[in-house]
Image: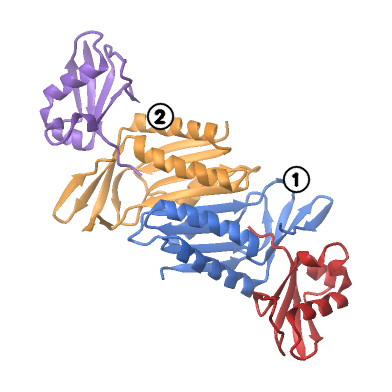
Chain colours: A purple, B red, C blue, D orange
Amino acid sequence: MKVSVLFFGATAEEAGTAKAEIDLEDGIGAETALTEILDRYPKLTASRDRSSLLFAVNQEYVRADETVNEGDELAVFTAVSGG
Amino acid sequence: MKVSVLFFGATAEEAGTAKAEIDLEDGIGAETALTEILDRYPKLTASRDRSSLLFAVNQEYVRADETVNEGDELAVFTAVSGG
Amino acid sequence: MGLMFFELTIDPLDVGEIARRVVPEECGATVTLDGYVRRFTRGRETEYLVYEAYKPMALKEMERLAAAAKDEFDISNVAIVHRLGKLRIGETSVVISVAAPHRRAAFEACEWLIKELKRTVPIWKKEVYADGEVWVEGE
Amino acid sequence: MGLMFFELTIDPLDVGEIARRVVPEECGATVTLDGYVRRFTRGRETEYLVYEAYKPMALKEMERLAAAAKDEFDISNVAIVHRLGKLRIGETSVVISVAAPHRRAAFEACEWLIKELKRTVPIWKKEVYADGEVWVEGE
């Protein structure tokens, strides 16, 4: 299935793009989807722990038990620094 | 000695004036000065306790041991309600 | 010492303009308290308010409070502005703006300043109703 | 529910205009937090900042935070506005205005909202120095 993946700020620079379309296995779990994304964009974890990245599905912080579906909007970004 | 006495808001309405010049005994204590003023303007304590009035000498809240001197600016007013 | 300013004015207050006046380059946050005229007080509908001050003493008290806040909290700049005269419903009567390197101190100092202003600064308000008026006495 | 509004904009923020937008007739106080660009961070001089947001998610998060604040504190209206794009030193990056019947709740809710905004709303800043730039990662 196709999903879109968005990157912002530091992760966009590291991924070399702000948006990508990728293919994932149907009904994959969110954690597994993140692993697949990080495998494709190794610079995202080159200088930081995976645990310091935040992951959203359809504009909400992801829940551990969530699955990813066709057409979903995924996003991977660092801890926020607005304000 | 002559001193001036200022009234504001409710006390000005009750005293019938915003400012008066009065004669007091030289070197009188502040508490005694207040008593003299309240004697001259009995409406100020007609509907409230004396203890609810505030008293300033030369634009500062009065201290118990303070004395009043020629030319001082006294003021008598109710608990403040700005803000 | 930082910037401190205190004003009593019969002109309308511009809360943003006041807040911006206290911004120092090294600071990160300003907290602003904006108080305004309520329509209802104790169930009674107010038509307008009139504020009166013992002006020189009020300005001295504001300065004393700001100095005390600077001693107590890690803040940089303080503005205290109170409007006088006739105020309609919804108009701003008081603005207190506190700038600090860290926002916690700005929140604490701003809240302390409005509490103390209401307790010690010689300003009084008269509430005017359709059928009468009353000078409000503080607590 | 009261009035709540959330904005992301590249235009300069007018803190007073934002604070006035949340004033309801029955309310007595608005507390406004105004955050702005510091010249120095960790001893290094910043030339300017660039803010970027995951806009639809940031607006949803702001709305979620404001709803949570309304549940937790006795407040009436909330405005959260964050600026994006390039900001010079001293320019306002964020304004949070909370109106409440009693000022205590407005102070508490405003402080809670800025703390949570910095923790959960997907906005990032890039600090640009004379000799480089860095995307800041939150804590």
The amino acid sitting under disc 2 is: Lys
Dot 2: chain letter: D
Marked residue chain, label 1: C
D121 or D81, nearer to the observer: D121
Q: How crowded is mark 1: few (under 14 residues within 10 Å), some or many (20 or more)?
A: few
In which image quadrant can residue A35 be found? top left
Q: Return the x and y of residue D6 as percentages of the image width and height.
A: 44, 36
Question: Is residue D39 among the parts visible in the rendering?
Answer: yes
Residue D123 quadrant = top left
Question: SS of the residue at dot 2?
Answer: helix
Q: Residue furthest top?
A: A26
Question: Residue beneath label 2, please?
Answer: D60
Q: Is residue A35 above or below residue D38?
A: above
Which residue is nearer to you in this view: C126 or C106?
C106
Q: In this view, does B68 lie to the left or right of D56?
A: right
Q: In which quarter of the image is the C terminus of chain C?
A: bottom right
Q: Where is residue D135 in the image (x, y as percent from the top left)?
A: 21, 43
> Is residue D19 shown above or below D78?
below
Q: Where is residue A43 in the image (x, y as percent from the top left)?
A: 11, 32
- Residue B17 image offset from top left, x and y in percent: 81, 75
Taking the spot 54% from the left edge, 66% from the top edge, the residue there is C65
The residue indicated by pointer 1 is C42
Question: What is the secondary structure assignment of the residue under circle 1?
Answer: loop
Type of residue at label 1?
Arg
